[in-house]
Image: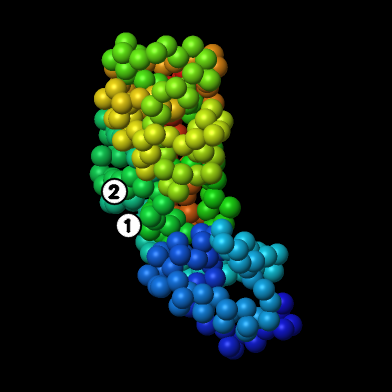
Amino acid sequence: MCENSHTSELDWDDLRAFLAVARMGRLTVAARRLGLDHSTLSRRITSLEANLRVLLFERSPTGYKITEAGQKLAAEVQQMESAVIRIRTDVSAEVNALAGPIRLTMPEGFSSSFFVRRLNHLPAELNAVRIELIANPSILSLTKREADIAIMMERPTLGPLVSRKLCDYEYGLYCSRSYLQSHDNIAAPSDIDRHFVIGYIPDYLPTPAHDYLRDYLPHRDADLQVSNILTQVDATCQGLGVALLPCFIADNHPELVRLLTGDISFVRSYWIVTHENPRYPSRTRSIKDFIVGQVEAYRTKFRPSS
């Protein structure tokens, strides 16, 4: 690839565009992230491929699949991006101090049903930290330093990032007490099909692994489709129907009843992710340690069947 390229012709904007598509896997999503229209972004990718004389992506209706040559280039461009970020990063004592802002991004279910409920246990030495909490991990990029710590539902595979599994969390089948009293009994997973089901909009699944309803209703979709888990919980609490919900969220609502505990129980995972060269090393390490410690202390909340 290097023998056939002419680095004097390479455009950094084209490389940034390529890296965004490599990370997102979808041209339209990458275009929104960069603030470009998809046709402009497509032209940049085509221009870069022409300059390098190599195919970087395999195009299909479902997205852009990176080629082996593209993976090699992505590794190089990520190193370039990291170098630029390091140059811009202030390494003064003020950056390393505990006092000041730190931005966290995490799924709204984890944020509202666990994290904010534990903030009153924040150690006194962290009182000077100003937490900026964004309950939507899909809108920010750690690689571009738009956030300092992220809780994610999938482990990232691209970027100068450090990640570790935070915890597994269990799902169960739930309905409200009022729904249970006024509807037919659910004695087996096959009975779910006779009930009003609440679930995700298929196009708005947080990750492909969250298409878990297919395991129990392979022949139809949910009757009420919602883009976020907290509204699914609220709809279930209101007695609209049954839903597969994370136990640590559902258990905060005493009006909910778990059904078929022995038959329906599965887990998904949270990952905690930081940049390999954090903007605020001391702050980042301290808040990360706090989150990990709180999850460890309340692990049975996430895996009640264990």
| Gap in angstroms between the C-alphas marked 1 and 2 | 18 Å
Q: Residue 41: percent from the left, percent from the top?
A: 48, 74
Q: Residues within 10 Å of mark 1 (few under 14, many from 20)?
A: few
Label 2, residues with CA under 10 Å away: few <14, some 14-19, many ≥20: few
At 26% from the left edge and 39% from the top edge, which residue is drawn? 127
Q: Is residue 58 left or right of residue 14?
A: right
Residue kind at label 2, given as amino acid type: Glu
Horizontal placement of 302 versus 113: left or right?
right
Q: Which residue appears at 36% of the width and 47% of the height?
A: 136
Label 1 sits on a secondary structure element that is helix
Q: Which residue is mark 2?
A: 132
Q: Which residue is mark 1?
A: 94
Can the viewer see residue 188 in this picture? yes
Q: Nearer the viewer, residue 31 or 295?
A: 31
Q: Position of residue 73 (x, y in %)?
A: 64, 70
Residue 297 appears in which quarter of the rendering? top left
Q: Nearer the viewer, residue 221 or 43?
A: 221
Pointer 1 or 2: first along the chain: 1
Using the image, determine if residue 122 lies above or below residue 75.
above
Residue 146, relative to residue 111: is it above or below?
A: below
